Amino acid sequence: MTLIVGASAAGLATAEALRRKGYTGRLTILGAEPHLPYDRPPLSKQVLSGTWEPGKAQLRSPEALGALDAEFVLGDPAVHLDVAERAVHTASGRVLKAENVVLAAGLHPRTLPGQRTLRTLDEALALRSDLLKRKRTIVVGDGVLGAEIAATARQMGVAVTLTGPQQAPMALQLGPVVAELLAELHTSQGVDLRLGAAVTGVDDHGVLLETGEVLPADLVVVAFGSVPATEWLQDSGLVLGNGVVCDSRCRAADGIWAVGDVARWHHETLGRLVRLENRTNATEQAVAVAGNILGADQPYTPVPYFWTDQFDAKIHVHGFVGPETSVVEGSLAERRFVVRYHRGGEVVGVLGWNMPKQARQHRQQITPRCPATAAASTPGAA
Amino acid sequence: MKITVDQDKCCGAGTCVLLAPDVFDQRDEDGIVVLLDAEPPAELHSLVQEAASVCPAAAISVSS
Ligand SMILES: Cc1cc2nc3c(=O)[nH]c(=O)nc-3n(C[C@H](O)[C@H](O)[C@H](O)COP(=O)(O)OP(=O)(O)OC[C@H]3O[C@@H](n4cnc5c(N)ncnc54)[C@H](O)[C@@H]3O)c2cc1C
Ligand code: SF4
């Protein structure tokens, strides 16, 4: 039997890849949430805005899940892993033993006491219901999630302030030139940017900045990063450190594997441990892990990739942000372009702004060997 | 095999095109998926299954 802990993008894709590669053994997928696998990127976009019914974010149809021939055990979080026995103990008292255990438990958002965060479907619906009351909202966190929430809330007609320590939203992930364009976009759409000062807390009056200023708010949404969901593995003996630490095959121990946002593995071409928090990594790493479970013995060496949608901008980032940029297609002024990031003579990354196809076409120029300033991923990563 | 794509869900990642360029393409203007062959030959089935599984927007469905 193969047991997958985490019933979301990475866990589901691992199960599918195992079946596709001919695995006929039993498959059990254990999930903490009561829901069948659903997708997270729409939570801060179409589900939050209400453009989609929540059901549209389901990852697979009931027929496709049925064809997978896997048993879903939902609403029952894993609480302990016995590495030697490869046995997972659950909150309700189940003990599930398997030849292979795949850890795909994702992340928990960091938060401030009593404030809203956004990681799950239930949290998205709760946040949506608050935003519909048109409260004066402050988003704490200037990374990709904070910027997306601010954009969506603004498009719902809400008065929004975006706060964070960087000079421009997503500066770490986009580099200064493109982040400045994103700042302009947010400002032109009426988001109040209060950047360059870290938030130190929240009280009844609002959000406190390190400068001593207080920003009044009725609703505070916290989006300043996440921590890997490894709390239940603390006493397992696995090596933990900003995720489940794995070898280049994504193996944490004999018969124990990690995949998706929770996995920190040795990326052979980069020559260091990497953890990525993005949607394509979840499924691509799943394919690699399934292959290795079945004996492929291949290293996983992806070029990272993520996208984000904010207002009319669809931004796609392949590889890493480097110190030098050059525009290779389109123009910054028209807000339709592809930029390349360089480090010395090497291309380390490519970014498309409303040019997804063209950005992808430049992707093969990337040399993934380069040590990076920032991974194409959310700030907690790498 | 019969493929359907949901252009409303597609985020324009192009993962499908990298895997199966004879079956999928992207629109030049916005990167949204275009289905070139809804009933591809048998030798492409496993790549198409993989594309459906790894598509980061769950925009590709396959029925037999
Ligand atoms: C709001 C939002 C928007 C995003 N937008 C984008 C985007 O535009 N582009 C992009 O590239 N990426 C985006 N991402 C990131 C992307 O969604 C993640 O990288 C992806 O979901 C990772 O998949 P995963 O399966 O590794 O982890 P998760 O999706 O987090 O799934 C882990 C699952 O494991 C469960 N679990 C946790 N602990 C346990 C336990 N002890 N026992 C059993 N189950 C457990 C959790 O409940 C969860 O269902 C976004 C993420 C969020 C939250
Ligand atoms: S992989 Fe999915 S999201 Fe990406 S272009 Fe193809 S259909 Fe669209």
Image (spheres, coloured by chain):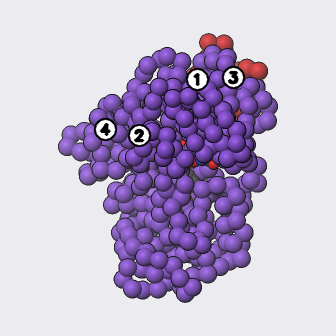
Chain colours: A purple, B red
**Which residue is labeled 2 in the image?**
A239
Q: Is residue A339 left or right of residue A74?
A: left
Residue at point 41%, 55% (across, down): A379
Amino acid on which disc 1 is placed: Glu
How far is disc 2 from disc 1 in space, using C-alphas? 20 Å
Residue A334 is situated, as x and y percent measured from the top left of the image, at: 44, 58
Q: Tag 1's secondary structure?
A: loop
Q: Secondary structure at mark 2?
A: loop
Label 4 SS: strand
Whether label 3 lies within 8 Å of ligand 1 gets the answer no
Q: Position of residue A85 (x, y in %)?
A: 56, 28
The N terminus of chain A - image quarter: top right
Marked residue nearer the N-terminal end (4 or 3): 3
Mark 4 or mark 2, which is nearer the start of the sequence? Answer: 2
Q: Are marks 2 and 4 in contact (CB under 8 Å)?
A: no
* Amino acid tagged 3: Arg
